[in-house]
Image: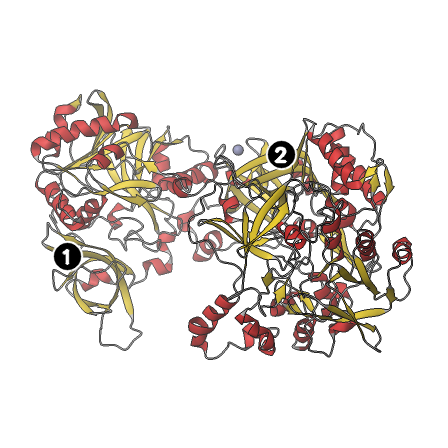
Amino acid sequence: MSAAFRIPGAGRLKQARTASFSFDGKSYAGIEGDTLASALLANGVHLVGRSFKYHRPRGFLSAGAEEPNALVQIVRDDARKTPNVRATVQELYDGLAANSQNRWPSLSFDVGAVNDIASPMFSAGFYYKTFMWPKAAWKSLYEPKIRAAAGLGVSPDRPDPDHYSSRYAHCDVLVLGGGAAGIAAALAAAETGASVIIADEQADLGGSLRFETGARIEGKDGFAWAQAAVASLKGMDNVRVLSRATAFGYYAQNFVGLVERVSDHLKSPGADLPRERLWQVRARRVVLATGSIERHMVFADNDRPGIMLASAARTYLNHHGVAVGRNVGVYTANDSAYAAAVDLKKAGVNVAAIVDLRDNPTGPAIEEARALGIEINFGRAVVRAGGKLRVSSMTVQPKNGGGERTIPVDAILMSAGWTPSVHLFSQSRGKVAFNDETKRFVPGTYAQDCVSVGACNGTDGLSATIDEAYAAGAKAAKDAGAKATKGAKPKVDAGENWSRGMLGAAPGAGPDTTVKAFVDFQNDVTAKDIRQAVHEGMRSIEHVKRFTTNGMATDQGKTSNMHGLAIAAETLGKPIPQVGLTTFRAPYTPVTFGSIVSHARGPLFDPTRRTATHGWAARQGAVFEDVGQWKRAWYFPKTGEDMHASVNRECATVRKTAGLFDASTLGKIEVVGPDAAKFMELLYTNPWEKLEPGRCRYGIMLREDGFIYDDGVVGRLAPDRFHVTTTTGGAARVMNHMEDYLQTEFPHLNVWLTSISEQWAVVAVQGPKSREIIAPLVEGIDMSDEAMPHMSVREGKICGVPTRLFRMSFTGERGFEVNVPADYGEAVWEALWAEGQKHGATAYGTEAMHVLRAEKGYIIVGQDTDGTVTPNDAGLDWAVGKKKADFVGIRGLTRPDLVAKGRKQLVGLKTKDPKVVLEEGAQIVADPKQPVPMKMIGHVTSSYWSENCGRSIALALVAGGRDRMGETLYVPMPDGTIEVEVTGMVFIDETGGRLNG
Amino acid sequence: MLLIRCPYCEEERPELEFRNAGEAHVARSANIAGESDDDFEKFFFIRSNPKGIIYERWRHIHGCARFFNAVRDTVTDRFIMTYKAGEPKPSKLPKNSNDVVSK
Ligand SMILES: [Zn+2]
């Protein structure tokens, strides 16, 4: 059964292929090839939404991507509820379910419409004025209420189940827009053999040939020619045709982002299909064939459902076979609306009258309408539309005033002229120029290797468009390096011409009236709002835009910008170019987050790095924490243990017997070469020349400003070879820092730097029994205290595989770090674990590691330091070579501020109540009785419960801290002030006896 | 995304492979320990931050890993030319920067 407004014989859709769909729960019949808009119109449905601010009833303005009104929610299932879909773009599929938005309780009766009556409150700039007082009410009352009332659809509340893909592509010529101009340009470029990509936002290429019945090319109907041409392009190996693909952004050096909608038009998309595909195309040359967009007429109540662009009505008729009404009126200021009247009249629709603002226009379009017997009124304006949920009449008046006449209509087709789509050109940083004669902004100065052709370039007429586009396509290919074109230019037999028109408000829109003559439908901005903005002092169009929000909705003012600009210019009494055009920014139409994020979400959001022992730790029930990209074992709870119990046991066991810890994530850099020691002297504060091979040293790296940048133990394996360790988080930047100096400041040094972080797995074995655990597995290394004292390194074998065995400690116990090639990491760990079991050793995680090092006052760069801490501040002055003539940071250390008294210094803190554990980051004051805001003299950097000390311990940066030993300081917290005593940083084994065994 | 020509790899590569490393031609004194406060301030803290032509250091970090110098226009973001670390500041810039980046 055919829908009521489907015209038999009209349009290109095959009537047999029906598709049923629902809108707000009601079922309708459509045809495959319909958009949701054309299918609703076929059923006589014009009312599809409520406006953003005033909740005014709204219908379809357009038949394309510029649509500001007909935004709906498409619901596939619970997780797929896409809001703000333009019904004019959404292709129909069988079973499609759509809902209207921004209305409650129903579309035809919407409580929010009271805003329309209360509209004086909501005039231009109302956000800035009405809700200024009281200030606190903005957050608690106004903002939430405004946001709730001004909704644009509802976000889905579940994770997006679809997947998205992305591709990079390169081509000689990228053609953006697949209308007559784009196709002609692509043909010319493709025939040279150049690689060509042509992209168009619609399902079928053809652009305005879709409705332009007056066009004939190569003996064919224009749209049929387009399909044939596209078929031949698709047959060429050097051409890629992208349909349903919107170029949304034009970036530097001909880099263009496009989104291809792959499956939103399918009834049941295959699970393997992405929903959308992001194309990032780098083109040698770009041809912009983006066409133009028709403007509406600005008159009172021009937003009533049933009032639409003339070209939209033609598209619905000539492509979809749908009449937008039975008795239509036309209101125009240029010729192109006449063609709409003619097409509809020929299809059997009554055209009540054409109202033309111009005085005595002439031309074939007008003659044809007259010949069909359509009433034409020159020099008149539509001053008002009747009806509410649907337009019911238009009231006509001579434009200079006079008697009114009301004509009943069920639709009004309007055209104020055509605006070249210079969005992408403008995004390319090209400068537009105003053509005073045609009142259009067209491409002026180019910033990139691109060219505009056809309507977007201000070229009028099909013949001229194809001439220009074909030549430009051939030239673009030639400039990209291709040979001369072999093909022939398509021959235009007939075309239409829609030049000229008007900008700004028509007589029915004021200026002194309070009527609502809409300029921007999506943001509910009227002609009056723009005038008011000027009257209130806005002079630049950028200010007018922000004050009124004109052009700031998701349609980015595709239909409204030029009208808004013209009204502002008229009110200011300035020519349009002096008021200026607002900047066009990406995206051209809204882009989903999904397409930009693509596969980079969930586990693929960021790489996950796992150490060699990860599997073992997981099997032991370790709890992991994220440290940068690393997963590190945090603690190893036994049955029934919580984190505290586990960490307490791990810490106690390490000091009593031994513990095994995976230290593989530490950064490791091999510094090799005849000048390796010289290089180390320059990059670290310490002296290195005299360090004997086989010995280690704790090194500090500064930035040039004198602040601590990184630290770590460095082993000298040979006179020309250092094994440097860095913090886990600092691995990459330390490597960068070293490379920077080696390549640019010290290139005379003969040194090679190699990152070896991932080559070596590291098992730290710490505790009194550590040597007993390792020794049985080691070959070729004498591990006695005499042969291998604290801070030494040996090369040999463990479990039959090569090892770099360090004797070093981050716990204060006798300790070793066993480096083995990463592939053997897990096996060696398991062997050490088996030995450790014999001695009652534990595996310990990063939390216990933190506690154990804090018990000894060992700092962690980035936790106890923050980029403003010098070695002296950290109590590490001993590590700075006093006799050195140069190292990075040597001059920074003597800056006046860095040697001044009273700097914050690292100290220990003990709470007076040993059970209280301070919060890291808590502020410290000297006098808790002083008025708020108190003078803060420092903060807690590390704080833990220490089972080994039987009390809490903390490290803190405190002003003049080392002169405050024994002083009582205070840590004010929300539930009371905590008393603390300033102490040294070492809480266990101050003499270091345990280190040496 | 910009294309940047690495003077060591001798080809244009996408911006993602590179990392900016601050202003170029800021030499570290051979006798930095003896520098006056004013000189050290100029060396370490003061940068030209021009509107227009800037000489800066980049690193082809996800490529050959070399540091090199570039001349860039901070208004248009266009790379005018690149050259190896250690080479002197170019006394003359190419006229049509477009030719440089697209060749
Ligand atoms: Zn390179």
The residue positioned 63% from the left and 60% from the top of the image is A69
Q: Quadrant of the N terminus of chain B?
A: top right
Question: Are there few (<14), some (14-19), or many (20+) residues within 10 Å of tag 2?
Answer: some
Separation of marks 1 and 2 at Cα, in angstroms = 62 Å
Question: Which labelled disc corresponds to residue A616?
Answer: none
The subunit carrying tag 2 is A
Three-letter residue code for mark 2: His
In the image, residue A182 above or below residue B42: above
Count of all numbered marks drawn on residues in the image: 2
Question: Which labelled disc corresponds to residue A952?
Answer: 1
Q: Position of residue A432 (x, y in %)?
A: 74, 54
On the question of residue A785 being in view, the answer is no
Q: Position of residue A345 (x, y in %)?
A: 82, 55
Question: Are there few (<14), some (14-19), or many (20+) residues within 10 Å of tag 1?
Answer: many
The residue positioned 43% from the left and 40% from the top of the image is A741
Of residue B64 and residue A183, the one placed in the foreground of this image is: A183
* Lower sequence index among marks 1 and 2: 2
Q: Position of residue B76 (x, y in %)?
A: 64, 50
Seen as rendered, the residue at the extreme front is A1
Q: Secondary structure at mark 1?
A: strand
Three-letter residue code for mark 1: Ser
**Dot 2 beta carbon under 8 Å from ligand 1:** no
The residue positioned 67% from the left and 60% from the top of the image is A582
Q: Is residue A8 left or right of residue A65?
A: right
**Dot 1 beta carbon under 8 Å from ligand 1:** no
Of residue A789 and residue A99, the one placed in the foreground of this image is: A99
Q: Position of residue A362 (x, y in %)?
A: 91, 59
Question: Which labelled disc corresponds to residue A170?
Answer: 2
Residue A352 image-quadrant placement? bottom right
